Structure formats: C-alpha cells, structure tokens
Image (spheres, rainbow, N blue to C red):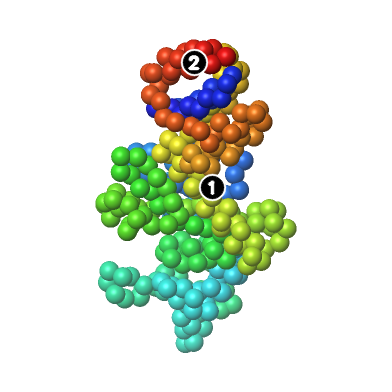
Amino acid sequence: MCLVAVKQPYVLQILYDDDAESPRDWDNFGRMVCWHSRYNLGDKHSHSKPGDFLQELVRESMKPIDVISYVKDGHSNGLIFEHDKSGDVWRLLSYSDYFKKWYEEYVVETPPGMNDEDLSDAIIECMGEGDLLMLARQKNCILKLNLYNHSMLSMSTSSFIGHAHHAEWDSGQVGWIYASHGDVKKEYGNVTPETLEKAENLLRAEVETYSCFLCNQCYGFRLYKHGAEENSCWGFIGCINDIKKDMAGHLPEECRNLLEDLEEVPDVRFDGYIDHEYEEMEVMA
C-alpha cells in the first residue's frame, strides 16, 4: 500500500522505504548495547555478555577508592568487608544465594597488601549485576532495553508485559542504552537533576526511533508534477503523523497541504491511478 494525495498539477505519493538507513548509524547521544541469539541489534560492541559490559563501564566510570568504599560502607547486596582484628586483616566475603552462606574471596592486610586499583578490580570481578548497575548509575544515565518479538520487532525502555499480546513469553530485556555524565555535560552544559532527566528523555526518544525502524515504519515520498517525478526524499522514520511534519519541510510550500489529504492506494494500482488522475485534470482544465 502507499498513500496518495492530488492537487492539480501535483500528485504526492508516500510509500515504505525498504532500504532505510538504521538510526543507529546516525550521530546519536546514547550508546546501545544488546545481546540476542538471532538479531544484530543496537550499536556494535565487543562485549560477549552483559556482565563484561557492566564491569567495563564501572571501571571506566568509577575511581577505585569509590568502588572500595561502596562495599566497605555497606551498600553492596552481595559483598561485605569484614575486619578480622585478631589478624589485622580485611576479608572480602561474597554471598551465595544457592548455598545461603558467605564465602571468603580475598584477604587484604592492613595496611592493604593490594593497591586500590587491584583491590577495586577484584571487587568488580565478584560483583553481581545489581551492584554493578548501582555503581554505573552514579556516573551514567543507563536504561534497560526490552525487545518484543511477535510477528515484528519492537523495542522500549519500559516492559511490554501488560501492554502487548503474549508479552510474558515474547518479550524480555536485551541490553541497555546509556550516556555518561560527561556526555550529559557536553550536551546540556552541566549535570543536574534537570539535565539528567532531559538526557533520559533523549535516550528514550532514540529507542522509540529505533523501534520504528525495527518494525518498518520507514517512509519516503515522490512528488509528481504534470505526470513526471519532480522530487523525492527517503529515510523518514517514525509514526506516519510525525513523519508528515518532517516531510513538509522537504516539499514546496504549495504542496504541503497535500499531506492532510492522503488516501491509501495499492502499489500495483498506482501507475494506473496517477494516469487516471491526470486524465481527470485534463478534462477539468
């Protein structure tokens, strides 16, 4: 199907763009990291599994002393430092949900026998996803990416469960989209609660655009004048009402109101349709 509108001497045709460029090839604010067994999603990356990505993000974002303090101050859900006064050492313990007990991971002498960087790295290696996310979010805006795969692909930063058919079985998390606080400062001039909220909204908008690309909401137009193609433009991605606003800027001013008079016409009938319209125009003339 295509959408067509007529205003003598013009015919405007809007149709699907089957060769649209992925919006992840654009100059994006956020970085999108995904893992899926069948689809290549998001931006290219070298992380074999989510845990590797989160560990690297924490290493890049946090100072070693802050990682150590996070555990020493009791903020971790799965790690603790226990001070053994008799031996004057700190023991790093991790909790096993399976065995329901704590296990010793490292013994750190006082003064530390490991430098802060090595100790921080050892802690990060022992951390679960929850702690890694807590640390990463201290220096990054990071949102979950959920994929819905049911006759077509859709992506969202929110859960599809309760909002889409069979989402309990056909949806789940496939990764994250994130931007560092440095990116936020570069984009908005400062890092404040207000600019962080703006940054998250921008990340959500990028995901919405990418979701439209995944479900083939990609369009282009051809503009005919006196039966001959005069202009065309491709690569509009989004819901049809939104992309019509973008298209208006690429059309001659006298043709913009055609966007309000579109009707569906089968592709196979378009050539005959346009010939018929010009025959009608000639009769009216």
* Left or right: where 94 falls relative to 237: left
Q: Residue furthest bottom?
A: 86
Say which mark, if any, is on residue 280. 2
Q: Amino acid at mark 2?
A: Glu
Residue at point 60%, 57% (across, down): 199
Please tell me which residue lies in front, 106 or 57. Answer: 57
Q: Mark 2 falls on what kind of element?
A: helix
Q: Position of residue 74 (x, y in %)?
A: 49, 79
Residue at left offset 45%, top offset 70%: 106
> How many numbered marks are there?
2
Residue 259 or residue 232, whichever sits in front: 259
- Camera sees residue 44: no
Q: Is residue 158 visible?
A: yes
Position of 245 with respect to 207 (left or right) is right
Q: Which residue is rendered at x = 59% and y = 34% of the image?
A: 257
Tell me the kind of residue under disc 1: Glu
Q: Which mark is residue 21?
A: none
| Eye-nearest disc, 1 or 2 | 2
Q: Quadrant of residue 157?
A: bottom left
Whichever of callouts 1 and 2 sits on the residue coming sooner in the sequence is 1
Residue 254: x percent and y percent? 65, 29
Q: Which mark is residue 206?
A: 1
The picture places residue 117, in percent across and down from the top left corner, at 59, 63
| Label 1 – label 2 distance at C-alpha | 44 Å
In this view, 109 is above or below 226: below
SS category of the residue bearing label 1: helix
133 to 211, vertically: above or below: below
Out of 46 and 189, give the one closest to the viewer: 189
Q: Residue at (68%, 53%) from the top-left corner?
A: 187
Q: What is the x, y in percent for residue 248?
A: 61, 35
